[in-house]
Amino acid sequence: MRLSNVKCVVTGGASGIGAATVRRFVEEGAEVCILDYDLPAAETLANELGESVFALELDVRLEPAVQAAAESVYARWEHVDVLVNNAGSELNKTYDETTLDEWDRVIDTDLKGPWLLCKHFVPPMVERGQGSVINIASLNGLVGFPLSTAYGSAKGGLVVFTRDMAIELATTGVRINCVCPGVIETPMMERWTDLMPDKQEAQSMLRGVMPIGRMGTAEEVAGAILFFASPDSSLCQGAVLSVDGGFTAQ
């Protein structure tokens, strides 16, 4: 019960790593607000987990929507202890095949979105003198991959954004840190392998990328996110934690 009576907001909390994080937070005693573009899925999860969870629809790319969500959450709770910026959008295209709309969608979701959430959720944390923000970046934000210019640029930007904000917030009592998952079995990864000529071969390739010989699970990433949400990480500020089965240790 490391998060007993802690109030947490998780974007993209209806599926994948986000949903695993919501479940883990509830197990640890937290109250959770799921902010997700897919409201029916978010509400289904909230109903499953009980009265400690509620859901709101949100497109993280739109500042008026983010501002309205923040006002709604703070009106309900009065304060927020933990913000997890997990909502993301993927793209697997070369730089020259990527369209302007695709570039904007990925950058706006994966980089502008976390900035907007911080802009509207963090100031009350600063006023209160405590809080934890966890940005979910990616292995693609730490090393280069083909077909990843938009996604990698967004996630790499999120890593640096985390470090910059950590310095700005260093004396406020609000912590901000970053988790970089490797190859994880999620709906997003499933969508990527569905695009490949041979799905089984693609999945085998992904397992081979991980030195441990398997893909990770959303629950394993949720454990790392829980660490940053809990007081156990009280000295962490601007930390970037790779949860990648040893890939970046090579």
Image: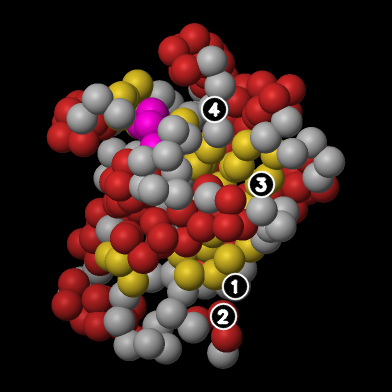
Q: Is residue 33 magenta?
A: yes
In what element is the residue under mark 3?
Answer: strand
- Majority SS type along the magenta span: strand
Mark 1 is surrounded, within 10 Å at the Cα level, by few (under 14), some (14 to 19) or many (20 or more) other residues, namely few
Kindly report which numbered mark, 2 or 4, lies closer to the viewer in this rendering. 4
In what element is the residue under mark 1?
Answer: loop
Q: Name the residue tied to disc 3.
A: 176
- Residue at position x 41%, y 51% in the image: 90
Q: Which mark is residue 248?
A: 2
Q: Nearer the viewer, residue 118 or 142?
A: 118
- Dividing the image into 4 quarters, which one contains the C terminus? bottom right
Q: Amino acid at mark 4?
A: Val
Q: Name the residue tied to disc 1.
A: 143
**Disc nearer the start of the sequence (1/4):** 4
- Residue at position x 39%, y 56% in the image: 222
- CA–CA distance between discs 2 and 4? 33 Å
Q: Position of residue 173 (x, y in %)?
A: 74, 39
- Residue at position x 47%, y 61% in the image: 224
In what element is the residue under mark 2?
Answer: helix
Q: Amino acid at mark 2?
A: Thr
Side of 133 relative to 183 (left or right): right
Kindly report which numbered mark, 1 or 4, lies closer to the viewer in this rendering. 4
* Residue 74 visible somewhere in the drawing: yes
Q: Nearer the viewer, residue 143 or 46?
A: 46
